[in-house]
Image (tube, rainbow, N blue to C red):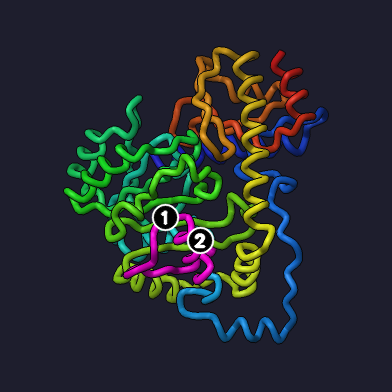
Amino acid sequence: MENTTATRHATYQRKLAKARTTATVPLIDVAANELPTNLIPQLGTLTLDWQGFLTAQQQEERTGYLPLMQTINRYHTARQQFTLDRQSLIITGGAQQALLLILNSLLQPGDAVAFVTPSYFSASAVFSAAGVRAYTIPTTTLGLDLTALETAIIKHRIKLLILNPTLQNPTGRILPLAERQAILALCQRYQVAIVEDDVFGWLVDRDIAVPPFKALAPDNVIYISSLSKLLGSSTRIGWIVAPQAIGERIRQVQKNLDLVPSLLAQVMADHALNSPEFSLGVTQLTTQLAQRRQNVTAILRQLRPDWHFVTPLGGFYLWVTQADRNIFEHLLEQHLLVTPGPIYGAERSAFRFNFAGLDYRQQRLLIQRLS
């Protein structure tokens, strides 16, 4: 199954790459995984001389650059998410590397994990790299299917449940508090740890934010975040917050695999998070994304009423379902690139639509293509 998924994923990616390199007319590329460069917050210039870099080296600890860890701690505390009491904070080379470290630290080859579908985890090679078995849990109109999760836990001896509960990729869904509590109760009953991937947490308005799983059960949850969805995928800085005993095992694996991110990248990340322009930049970004989301959803609802989606409360993805099983190919013929549902373990009739890059000009072009 995993090989079939990987092959299918590669086939779609080849088609997208070919369309991007051979297009003779302007493309509408809503298949991107991240923000367009012109939306990434502008955070000024990093000034770092050689002496300053040598000084920074003296502040590097086993788990990362101390000032960056202190900054991340302040961030979570200021947003009233959770504190690092009796927790370990470990800097990683992004969220995918963080997940790989967790799997290699806590599981043996052949152990089982579970994640919700549709999910970008369906396209991830991290499970095969760690030698673990991965099982998908379907969602219903009420959310994650708790009966299916319990059945999988018992049948396959699931060790970890991996969730992306805030602005889930690809659906954009935010799990409500009651659903989070129900999932936690079930996992605690069977002693299944939860890995919480919160890379989109930056893009949620505080007024609608739901407490992360880590805040609800600090000792049962391993938390992952990164800067990639905010400052671009090349940032390659993420972090893990885990109970101290688990954190120590992760640190040892990170050391053995030599996966400590570069000090320069950590210094730059700390500079970005402490930049006077950071908070304003995030606010401006979420405002721009909200405007584009409003405009694009209005266009789609008018011109494609048969496309069904729930408007998300943040982020930059729409998850669309409709009847045409060849929608990816048909849109490709119109020079409209989307990310097809099978990449996320869903039907061919579903697709992910990244509206972040659709400025006014692209919105006008979208209207022309869909009219």
Quadrant, the C terminus: top right
Label 2, secondary structure: give it: helix
Picture quadrant of residue 51: bottom right
Question: Which span is picked out in magenta?
Answer: 69-93
**Callout 1 amino acid:** Gln
Please say whether residue 330 is visible from this viewpoint. Answer: no
**Callout 2 amino acid:** Tyr
Residue 307's place in the image compared with 110, above or below, is above
Residue 74 falls inside the magenta stretch: yes
Residue 206 horizontal/vertical position (percent): 50, 45
- Distance (Cα) linking label 2 and label 1: 9 Å
Residue at x-position 54% and y-position 64%: 93
Of residues 281 and 249, which is closer to you in this image?
281
Label 1, secondary structure: give it: loop
Residue bearing the label numbered 1: 81
**Is residue 205 found left or right of 214 in the rendered image?**
right
Residue 301 horizontal/vertical position (percent): 60, 17
Residue at x-position 46% and y-position 26%: 347
Of residues 24 and 96, which is closer to you in this image?
96
**Is residue 222 found left or right of 302 in the rendered image?**
left
Residue at x-position 46% and y-position 50%: 198
Picture quadrant of residue 306: top right
* Numbered label attached to residue 75: 2
- Among the two numbered marks 2 and 1 on one chain, the one whose residue lies closer to the N terminus: 2
Q: Which residue lies furthest to the right in this view?
A: 24
Quadrant, the N terminus: top left
Residue 97's place in the image compared with 85, above or below, is above
Residue 49 horizontal/vertical position (percent): 74, 81
* Numbered label attached to residue 215: none
How many dots with numbers? 2
Of residues 208 and 114, which is closer to you in this image?
208
Please say whether residue 247 is visible from this viewpoint. Answer: yes
